Amino acid sequence: MKKIIKNILLALVVLLVLVQFYPRAKKNNDLTAVNDLATVHAVPTDVMDILKTSCYDCHSNNTFYPWYSNIQPSSWWLNDHIVEGKKELNFSEFATYRLARQYKKLDEIINQIKEDEMPLQSYTLIHRNAKLSKEQKLLVSSWSSALRDSMKTVYPADSLKRKPKPVVL
């Protein structure tokens, strides 16, 4: 029995070493800010600081990769979070979103913060400074709400609503 356990552990160690040679996907360090949120909307410095500290690692094209991102399988796990986060909301591409999507994403920011869904708990365990205080939550939510209100006054109402997808019969 001890020999079987020893062989299994040895196989796991060998597998862990071999998986380190599998290519890592770290293509999220684009420093150009051509389409960033701040290029189309006024973002106060204090709000931008919060977004960069608590959101940009997963929701922008500028990820700071920690040391453990060089170790598999954590690299795959991190990459999956980044890809999913950017698919949902990418502050670096915010200017390319249609007005209706920008408007909707601002509402989602408010809801995610209010319900403590963002930043992820798994992220704030390691990045303690990313955990939002009540004041920071209020600041980001108020800014997002004010921006939504200003969009309502500037743009026609129908441009802020998603057009329903046609029903295929």
Image (cartoon, rainbow, N blue to C red):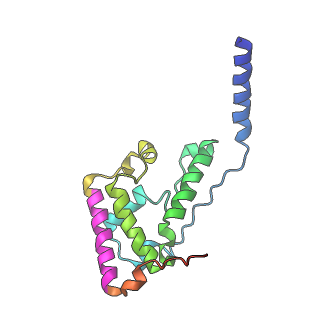
Q: Nearer the viewer, residue 148 or 41?
A: 148
What residue span does the magenta drawing correspond to? 136-153
Residue appearing at x 71%, y 40% in the figure? 19
* The quadrant where residue 84 appears: bottom right
Who is closer to the viewer here, 74 or 97? 97
**Residue 143 vertical position relative to residue 16 in the rendered view, above or below:** below
Residue at image position (46%, 44%) is: 122
Q: Is residue 63 left or right of residue 22?
A: left
Q: Residue 167 appears at what percent x and percent y?
A: 56, 76
Q: Is residue 149 magenta?
A: yes
**Quadrant of residue 104 in the image?**
bottom left
Residue sitting farthest toward the front: 169
Q: Is residue 97 left or right of residue 155?
A: right
- Tell me which secondary structure the magenta stretch mostly adopts: helix
Q: Position of residue 100 (x, y in %)?
A: 44, 77
Above or below, 50 relative to 98: above
Residue nearest the viewer, comparing 25 with 81: 81
Which quadrant of the rendered structure holds the C terminus?
A: bottom right
Q: Can residue 60 be seen in the rendering of this structure? A: no
Q: Residue visible at 40% across and 80% down? A: 160
Image vertical order of residue 36 relative to residue 158, above or below: above
Instruction: State the image coordinates of residue 133 (x, y, percent, origin top left).
Output: 29, 52
User: Farthest residue toward the top?
Assistant: 1
Give the mark count.
0
Which residue shows up at 35% across the image and 51% down it? 116
Q: Is residue 65 visible?
A: yes
Q: Position of residue 82 (x, y in %)?
A: 55, 56
Magenta stretch: includes residue 9: no
Quadrant of the frame with the N terminus:
top right
